[in-house]
Image: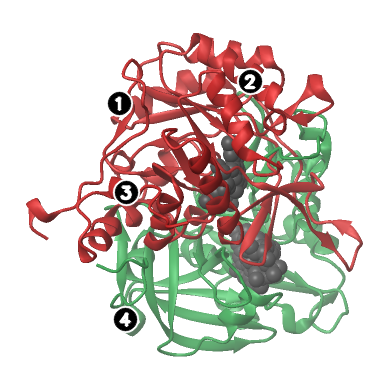
Chain colours: A green, B red
Amino acid sequence: MSTVPGRGQPTPYTRGREDGPVRSICEVLAYRKIGAYHQLTIVAPDIAARATPGQFVSLAVEGGGTILRRPFSITGVSQHGPWAGTIDVVLDVVGPGTAWLAGRSKHDVVDVVGPLGRGFPLPRQPATCLLVGGGYGAAPLLYLAAQLQHRGHRVDLLFGAKTGERIFNAIEGKRQASSTRFTTEDGSFGTQGRVTDVLPDIATSTGAEAIYACGPMGMLAAVAAQARERRLPCQVSVEELMGCGVGVCNTCVVPYRRRDGLANVRACYEGPVLDAKRVVWEAIGTTAMAGEPVEQGDAS
Amino acid sequence: MSAERRPDLRVSLSADPARPLELPNPIVTASGCFASGREIDRFFDIGGLGAVVVKSLTLEPRLGLPTPRMVETDSGMLNAIGLQNPGVDAWLANDLPWLAERGVRTIVSLAGKTVAEYRTLAERVRGQPGIAAIEANISCPNVEDRGMVFAAREEATRDAISQVTRVSAVPVFAKLTPDVTDIAAIAAAAVEAGATGVSLINTLSGMAIDVETGRPRLGGVTGGLSGPAIRPVAVRAIHEVHRALPDLPIIGMGGVRSVPDVVELIMAGASAVAVGTATFADPFATLELVEGLPDWLAERGYRSVRQLRGAVQA
Ligand SMILES: Cc1cc2nc3c(=O)[nH]c(=O)nc-3n(C[C@H](O)[C@H](O)[C@H](O)COP(=O)(O)OP(=O)(O)OC[C@H]3O[C@@H](n4cnc5c(N)ncnc54)[C@H](O)[C@@H]3O)c2cc1C
Ligand SMILES: Cc1cc2nc3c(=O)[nH]c(=O)nc-3n(C[C@H](O)[C@H](O)[C@H](O)COP(=O)(O)O)c2cc1C
Ligand code: FES
């Protein structure tokens, strides 16, 4: 038995219960550059078997005095064929952790905890679903699209980003949907503008009955407002800074109208997928939800 | 490892026969780093830990501070959660029964805004089945003293702790802040007020600035520093208190990740060791310390973890 957890363990080392999340030391099976993003395919049979779309994994990173894991949406799992038992994650390099991960290549080892969080609830009746993604927010939606199609729902995709190379995996998107639309802020790909500029038209022309969205908080708030206007059910996958990813630190909170009243719910535990109409969008990052006046000092 | 050579991990955290506290092993969770217990119980049976110290509870439910609530710093992190918690009554109704049912040794952490609130909190938890001890978190602001942290002053420490010890039937630990000049004097004040032991250390007060925007990186502006960066501060604080008060049980904490880290705090004078931030990086951190400690001791010929307490040759 090793005294340093995880070090020197054979791969794949997995620890956890019969169901729920596990910790696995996993081999990277493939690395691929997709536009501005990096995709890792990781051998994680237990996580692949347990995951549902919208859930995420947290990866340990090294270097630069980092101590915390980094959360990433699962963008696909393979259960059959030569890639059976693998999961895919997509990285946008924004800091030391994502830079370290993007430097991994085939046969390198990564330390993964997952699957974590609440995934997307699927419609009970056959439905026409509009999936709206911003930047790498498209990642979990591709996994969702595959599952919705498999269950006989109609899927339309609307992906937006700043530039064309930040539209994640347009080719894969086209394969998984009845229709696809892309918007870029610089007009380098698809329609110039934002997803919310074209969302009303697409929702009308496709006859959307449900909206699923993932992307930056500002985009989610705007999509949620449009869904509300049209009285469409809307599930959003939110992003908040995460300390632990497993529900114990209360870092990742989102103001939310629960059935029993207002609460700060954890994006990593009650979320990341939340009901858009219950999120108190205007209170995010403000003191509106602080139970006490903001007091300085040792208030941990 | 044969059964008879397996080192003894049991520790006692109380010198008071009327209020004993025996743990099967010295590894416990740090307050605010283990939520309700259910979250980590998804990974393993938390009943195997020495004890679970729960998030500090206040009289009323608290929503906490606005985000961002966390920033990673070199070998550590700052947090400004603002004591978000469901309130003592909701915890007693919803969370304690679950812990008690599983036989988890539960240490309840209480945080008051005023001296009187500590008494009310202690009364609420008194006699509740399944509570092994109280940790009075007095490293929080006293609204009657311009927000000065109770544990920053000997008098306020005495006032708050005596409110708890007066009504409690279980051992009481005073959780102290390291942001003081003489932590041994504060510990002595807690003992005078009847504390069974002390928990050392709470987070250090800190701050980080985003230099691109010129804004503080935490919604609460300042926050508490935890993780490996603070371990030397913890070792020093534990050493000072143990040297001044050798018989006083100490729950040590601050940046512990590995078995040698646990041993370091015990050698400084801790009777038990709490693990906080390390659980964020690895949900199995506490369990793996419970599992790894016997081998470390056996490999070096120690028969009991108690042998190591205060063993530093300083
Ligand atoms: C549920 C969820 C799913 C995500 N999915 C993806 C994905 O599929 N692809 C992708 O590229 N990114 C994703 N992110 C964002 C990703 O986690 C961050 O970009 C990453 O943690 C940054 O780490 P860093 O060390 O490179 O950057 P730094 O900014 O240096 O990170 C410092 C600290 O802040 C945290 N942090 C920084 N940005 C974020 C953020 N946006 N969200 C959460 N924590 C953050 C880090 O975890 C770390 O603790 C997701 C975030 C969440 C919460
Ligand atoms: C996110 C977070 C929340 C915390 N909340 C509390 C709390 O509610 N009450 C308390 O007494 N200490 C709290 N602490 C302090 C820890 O219990 C512990 O004293 C400190 O973090 C040092 O240990 P560590 O380095 O192992 O985390 C908190 C720490 C963190 C990181
Ligand atoms: S990140 Fe720790 S509770 Fe969600």
Q: Do pointers 4 and 2 mark residues of a single chain?
A: no
Crowd rating for badge 2 (residues with CA inside 10 Å; few <14, some 14–19, many 20+): many
The image quarter containing residue A107 is bottom left
In what element is the residue under mark 3? loop
Residue A81: numbered disc: 4
Q: Looking at the picture, does residue A64 appear above or below residue B74?
A: below
On residue B101, the disc is 1
SS for callout 1: helix
| Residue plotted at (79% across, 49% down) | A226
Compared to residue A99, the image places residue A281 above or below, namely: above
**Separation of disc 4 and disc 2 at Cα?**
68 Å
Cα distance between the residues tagged 1 and 3: 16 Å
Q: Which residue is mark 3?
A: B44
Chain of the residue that carries numbered disc 2 in the rendered image: B
Is any atom of residue A123 visible in this view? no
The number of callouts visible is 4
Q: Chain of mark 4?
A: A
Asked whether mark 3 lies closer than 8 Å to ligand 3, one says no
| In-front residue for pair A274/A203 | A274
Which comes sooner in the sequence, label 1 or label 2? 1
Mark 1 chain: B
Q: Quadrant of the image for the N terminus of chain B?
A: bottom left
* Mark 1 vs ligand 2: CB below 8 Å: no
Judged from the image, the secondary structure of the residue bearing numbered disc 4 is helix
User: Residue A277's x, y, as percent?
Assistant: 70, 39
> Are the two marked residues, 4 and 1, in contact with CB atoms closer than 8 angstroms?
no
Relative to residue B219, is residue A9 drawn left or right? left
User: Marks 3 and 2: which is nearer the front?
Assistant: 2
